[in-house]
Amino acid sequence: MELTVPVIGILRGVDEAFFPDLMTAAFDSGLQAMEVTMNTPGAERIVERNLSRVPKGNYLGMGTVRNIDEAKRAVDSGAAFIVTPNTDAGVIEYARGRNVPVIAGAFSPTEVYTAWNCGAQMVKVFPSGLLGPSYIRELRGPFDDIDLVAVGGVTLENLRDYFDAGVRAVGASSALFGKTALREKDLKKLSEHVRKFIEACP
């Protein structure tokens, strides 16, 4: 998975009927990758049914993949990548064995290195908001060769700070799509939010 747009859209609890229009609007607005979380009702069906609508060069994956069983279900659904909230060597190895990239969740330095050493393509520092960009900067000291993704607490206001601290990408949900736009299923506002967020990236 080659991310040229350093933003991953996170969709948790998204309405299945609304998803196709949402996905199209987001991709048309410049988003390259989005994940549907495993604990979204009908998540696997959402991914499976919408894969054919994903433009070339874009990615539809599954997030909140916490264990091997969920990893198998995500891979079987056709997810282009999986994202975990935790560091699980078995999940990383399983997905890699099936050529599915993994963005593995970690928080401590030990977890960050373990996730990377097990073969994660990128390491998701989660929840980033607890310690902020300064923590990312500290992690980049010893782990300057690891691609870090900040998730949790990333907003339009602090977006630049995270990139200045050294992240490879960020993951966001309501801050990216717009909380009201998601709730009201307002595609025009949603598209505006996505464009504004991506334009703020370096």
Image: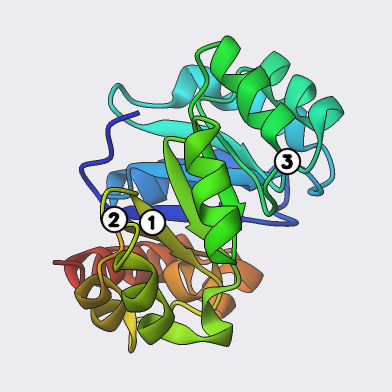
Q: How far is the residue under mark 2 from the one under mark 1?
A: 5 Å
Q: Amino acid at mark 1?
A: Leu
Task: Give the residue at mark 1.
Answer: 148
Q: How far is the residue under mark 1 from the one under mark 3?
A: 18 Å
* Residues at circles 2 and 1 in contact by the CB criterion of under 8 Å: yes
Residue 131, position as x, y percentages in the image: 52, 86
Task: Give the residue at mark 2.
Answer: 168
Question: Which comes sooner in the sequence, label 3 or label 2?
Answer: 3
Q: In the figure, 108 relative to 1: above or below?
A: below
* In the foreground, 20 or 151: 151
Residue 107 visible to the viewer? yes
Q: Helix or strand or loop: what does disc 1 sit on? A: strand
From the viewer's perspective, tell me whether residue 24 is left or right of residue 50.
left
From the viewer's perspective, tell me whether residue 191 is left or right of residue 52.
left
Q: How far is the residue under mark 3 from the one under mark 2?
A: 21 Å
From the viewer's perspective, tell me whether residue 176 is left or right of residue 82.
left
Task: Give the residue at mark 3.
Answer: 65
Q: In the figure, 99 relative to 60: above or below?
A: above
* Residues at circles 3 and 2 in contact by the CB criterion of under 8 Å: no
Q: Amino acid at mark 3?
A: Val
Residue 150, picture quadrant: bottom left
Instruction: Write the residue at 34% across / 49% down.
Output: 146
Neighbour tally class for label 3: few under 14, some 14-19, many 20 plus, Cα within 10 Å: many
